[in-house]
Image: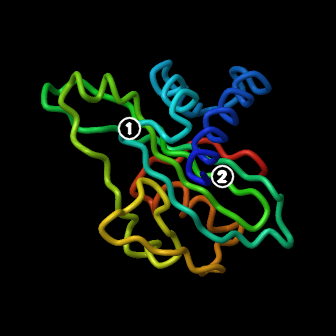
Amino acid sequence: MLATWAVKTAFLVELALRQQHSGARSVEGYLASPPEMAWLFAKLEPPPRSLAWLGCWDCQRESPFRYGPSGAPLVTADGVPVAGHFATFTLGFVAFQVFTVDFETADEHGAGQWNSHPPRSLAQALARIWPPDDANPHDVDWPQQWFARGDLDMLASWDGALRRGYDIGQ
């Protein structure tokens, strides 16, 4: 349920930012495709190929909401670029990271799976909450190692592995 909420929130935050800051952001995040939105609302779970992580955010002296999208392209069999959506947002003491992609387009072009493992520098502080790991179910320990305001860029870019986008709440 938490992963579904995080994916839905990432989609809606991007829609709201496009309305509020039309043309003002140097890099816009990913606009969810109709198949992704339809799947989310029909199945009440993240669309196929989606991934979600949970982290702990230190918001005591920070804005309670932060948002930072990054590009997350998929490698395809036919060489056609398929854009993925990697968004990081914080709400209070919680940080969420969501990866989604137009799964129909990804399948059509023979795209591989996106990286489901955070970089080693972040792995201990992020718990993957979607898709569920049926072979190894686990509870999420809380609180985890926390991230602070200066860490949003590191978190949203997976420690520099992804190109960083716009950050609201600076």
- Residue bearing mark 1: 48
85 or 47: nearer the viewer: 47
The dot on residue 89 is 2
In front of the other: label 1 or label 2?
A: 1
Pick out the residue farthest to the right: 61
Task: Report the residue at 13% width, 25% height from top.
Answer: 78
Q: In this view, does 8 lie above or below 159?
A: above
Is residue 59 rendered to the left or right of residue 14? Answer: right
Is residue 40 rendered to the left or right of residue 8? Answer: left
Q: Where is residue 27 in the image (x, y as percent from the top left)?
A: 58, 33
Task: Report the residue at 57% width, 63% height from top.
Answer: 54
Label 2's element? Answer: strand
- Crowding around mark 2 (Cα neighbors within 10 Å: few <14, some 14 to 19, many 20+) is many
Q: Position of residue 150 (x, y in %)?
A: 67, 68
**Can you tell which quarter of the image residue 56 is in?**
bottom right
**Can you tell which quarter of the image residue 25 is in?**
top right
From mark 1 to mark 2, how far is it between C-alphas?
21 Å
- Crowding around mark 1 (Cα neighbors within 10 Å: few <14, some 14 to 19, many 20+) is some
